[in-house]
Image (tube, rainbow, N blue to C red):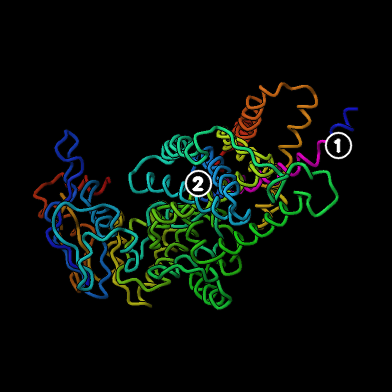
Amino acid sequence: MLEIKNVSKTFNPGTVNAKTALNGLNLTLNDGDFVTVIGGNGAGKSTMLNAVAGTIQVDTGSIVLDGRDITRLPEFKRAAYLGRVFQDPMMGTAATMQIEENLALADRRGQRRTLKKGITAADREHYIEQLKILDLGLENRMTAKVGLLSGGQRQALTLLMATLQKPELLLLDEHTAALDPKTAAKVLEATQRIVEKNNLTTMMITHNMRDAITYGNRLIMMYDGHVAVDVSGEEKKHLTVEQLLELFSKASGSDEADDKLLLS
Amino acid sequence: MFFSSLLNAAPGAIAQGMLWGIMAIGVYITYRILDVADLTVDGSLATGGAVCIMLMRAGCNPWLALLCAFLVGMLAGMVTGLLHTRCGIPAILAGILTQLALYSVNLRIMGSKSNQPISVDKYNLVVSQRFVKELSLRNPLIPAIVTLAVLIGILYWFFGTEYGSGLRATGANRRMASAQGIDTRVTVTVGLMLSNGLVALSGALLAQYQGAVDVNMGRGAIVIGLAAVIIGEVLLGKVFRNFALKLCAVVIGAVIYYMVLQIVLQLGLNTNDLKLFTAAIVALFLSIPCWKDSVRTKKGGVRNA
């Protein structure tokens, strides 16, 4: 369970460029929740994810994961509990290393790295089985450098790496935004499959409202650094894009919101 | 005449190239694996020489003196690493600061003298220039080859371990390494320590080989190291794919560098112009990828296609 309690973050405080990205944010994720997150540019979606991941330090409030207060924990320590896929396909993998080496690195997330062999024969077999789930033929290219893969393949690999050691929370930061529609659909499918199979608690930022409705059991919309709309269960299942826009206008108290959300 | 004198100079060039090869492997670790340009090496090379020679003059066993040089080199690398990772100083600047500080430290180690000799007649040196053309076990090429083989073996093993892989990941993609739970502040520091340990070891062997340590012996070392790395990559990068072979390529690069140096010296290059020549060679090789790119673009090819 993830509890974000009254979290605020202002970038460049005290300057003309001061920007309040998170403004008294409260959010609780139950175990097994698959939450999709939408909102206009600057609504604080990515900042929220980065705050949870530890890439940025928050000003006030607390972040508690499965009863552990991780608010002040450095990024590399939180990594033991978190799986992450970034928007940029280049970000989640080491391009100059082989597919199996990348997987082996991810497989030891949260463990002490010792002077034992980096990849064992048993590891290799395990990775081949896992790669088959992606259905991209990567299991036959275990020693290929990741830099040779396409953006979609890299994103799928990053997804597998993020879930190889079951994370307590999976963070997806618009992980299909940089891909062409066909590839994006494939990666989203794989996401759905992996999340369901492992019953992962997941937070997925997306700019695609339809995806936000299709995937997950809960949808939140952010506005001005806090959660403006929060729907789940049956209500979410029957949601339409039009209703979503209406909900958002009501929550933000503005008509312009539609355009801002749609155009971003 | 030209060829006979060149042949005469070849064993010396090879031996020197191999000893510098150890240093070049250190540069490879930072520049290629860790993706950090570390300028500490200009100072830590002489530090290694100074520690080794002064210990031996005080009666220390030569192998133990080499080990101490390695350890003190690691300490120098740690200073750079901490300045970079804990104080937020850019890596290049952190290296320059340590390098500058080491100049004073080296003079201290050397008893405030800028040069300290060690005579091959009085001390049991591991490598010495005097025997470089001798067909015997005293020939410095033998310990040089053995040392290189052992070092490359150890590094090959280390970079294949869980920890070593973490270090490589840090260089390949620091954010990814962080997201996989690697404390990159530690891995970067460990990489710098390993690198400077090797550089100091190289300096220690070079000082023994020359029969003296000089406080200025490391000046421009980084450029020689880079030259070795780049020459090795340009000439052998397509053939040598295995990591151990890549390290061999670096050493071969260093040997080639010293051979070329011998040739241009025989051709009448003024020794004072040597550093200019070296810098020009390295600048040339470093610009090749960029030029290749622009030539391809001009020919109508599409970049990033």
Q: Residue A187 location, x and y as percent?
A: 43, 63
User: In the shown orientation, is residue A171 left or right of residue A40?
Assistant: right
The amino acid type found where label 1 is placed reads Leu
The one nearer the camera, A158 or B208, is B208
> Does the magenta-highlighted stretch encompass residue B19?
yes
| Residue matched to label 1 | B7
At x 58% / y 76%, what residue is drawn? Answer: A121
- Quarter holding the C terminus of chain B? top right
Residue A166 or residue A173, whichever sits in front: A166
- The chain letter for the residue carrying disc 1 is B
- Residue positioned 34% across, 71% down in the render: A167
Q: Are marks 2 and 1 on the same chain?
A: yes
Query: Is residue B186 a member of the stretch shown in magenta?
Result: no
Tell which circle, 2 or 1, labels the residue nearer the N-terminal end.
Answer: 1
The chain letter under disc 2 is: B
**Disc nearest the viewer among 2 and 1:** 1
Question: Relative to B93, does residue A102 appear above or below in the rendering?
Answer: below
Residue range in magenta is B7-28
Q: Is residue B276 above or below residue A70?
A: above
Cα separation, mark 2 vs mark 1, equals 38 Å
Residue for badge 2: B35
Q: Quadrant of residue B119?
A: top right
The answer to whether any part of residue A91 appears in the image is: yes
Q: Nearer the viewer, residue B289 or B133?
A: B133
Residue type highlighted by circle 2 = Asp
Please identify the dominant SS of the magenta region. Answer: helix
